[in-house]
Amino acid sequence: MSINKAWSGLLVLGLLAGCSSNPPKSTYNNICAIYDFDDDWQDAARASEKRWGVPSYILMAFVHQESRFKHDAQPERPYFLGLIPLPRDSSAYGYAQAQDPAWKDYQKASGNWGASRSDVEDALDFIGWYNYESSRQLGISRKDTYNLYLAYHEGRGGYSRRTYNQKPWLKRVAQKVANQANVYRTQLQNCDAYIADSAEPIQLKTTRKTTAAPVVEKKPVSKPAPAASTRDTSTDLKPFR
């Protein structure tokens, strides 16, 4: 291997390392501790909230559920006879567990063709975008964690057909995500004090500027939208699994 190739490989690895951030397990249930560990999470969550109108505590609760903040999370690979690896059941990958088709839709919609599912900023922007579209297409409030998660899991077409009604376990998970979002929301009110008392306090950064037009919150709709009379197959794309 030439010296140039070796340096190129090290440069790529360095760039990849800079895009991802895996907080320790001890911080998962405390959003202030996550922000204290790496304020890139705060910057990315605030930027996505500003762009898409979905609260940062909901965005972070989605990451908590989907990947436990692991940049390379993906479904377990099945094995034949316990020895031969088989293809994974899903293309879900990264912090948001976005599947290939949904991720390509996001890249096209955002114009960010270089977006990476293992990048903190891109993953949180994807979650904000997907939930914004669920709100726009299905009438779900962008603060309704429970129904946003159902649409995230089932895809918008599945949500419209209310496929979640045949999955009691999924409703329990959606409620779990909603509960986590509420915990994060409460903690955010005291993050400044938490970080000030930490061993190595940091200064909270301001949100990075974004050129996206501001979004206006629509009137919340508490009930799931009824199934559409004409099925749009593009809404069947699930972000993961």
Image (spheres, helix red, strand yellow):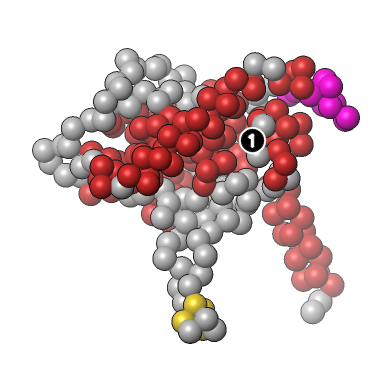
**Residue 210 shows up from this direction:** no
**196 is within the stretch colored magenta:** yes
- Left or right? Give the position of 178 relative to 120: left
Q: Which residue range is magenta in the image?
A: 195-205
Confirm whether the magenta stretch covers residue 177. no
Number of marks present in the image shown: 1
Place of residue 101 in the rendered image (x, y in percent of width and height, measured from the top left): 39, 54
Q: Decide if residue 223 is on the left or right side of residue 79.
A: left
Q: In the rendered image of this protein, does residue 64 appear above or below residue 195?
A: below
Of residues 7 and 72, which is closer to you in this image? 72
Residue at x-position 40% and y-position 26%: 144
Q: Is residue 214 shown left or right of residue 64?
A: left
Q: Nearer the viewer, residue 146 or 119?
A: 146
Looking at the rendering, in which quadrant would you find the C terminus?
A: bottom left
Please, is residue 10 above or below residue 133 in the view? Answer: below
Expressed as whole percent of the image width and height from the top left, the position of residue 36 reads 76, 31
Q: Which residue is drawn at the image coordinates 64% and 21% (left, top)?
A: 188
Which residue position is annotated with label 1? 29
Q: How would you classify the magenta stretch by its main secondary structure?
A: loop
Question: Residue 162 at what x, y percent from top left?
Answer: 23, 41
The residue at the point 70 percent across, 35 percent down is 34
Q: Give the amino acid at mark 1.
A: Asn
Residue 74 pos. (x, y %): 53, 59
- Left or right side of 209 for 110: left
Asked if residue 47 is positioned above or below residue 173 in the image, the reply reads: above
Secondary structure found at label 1: loop
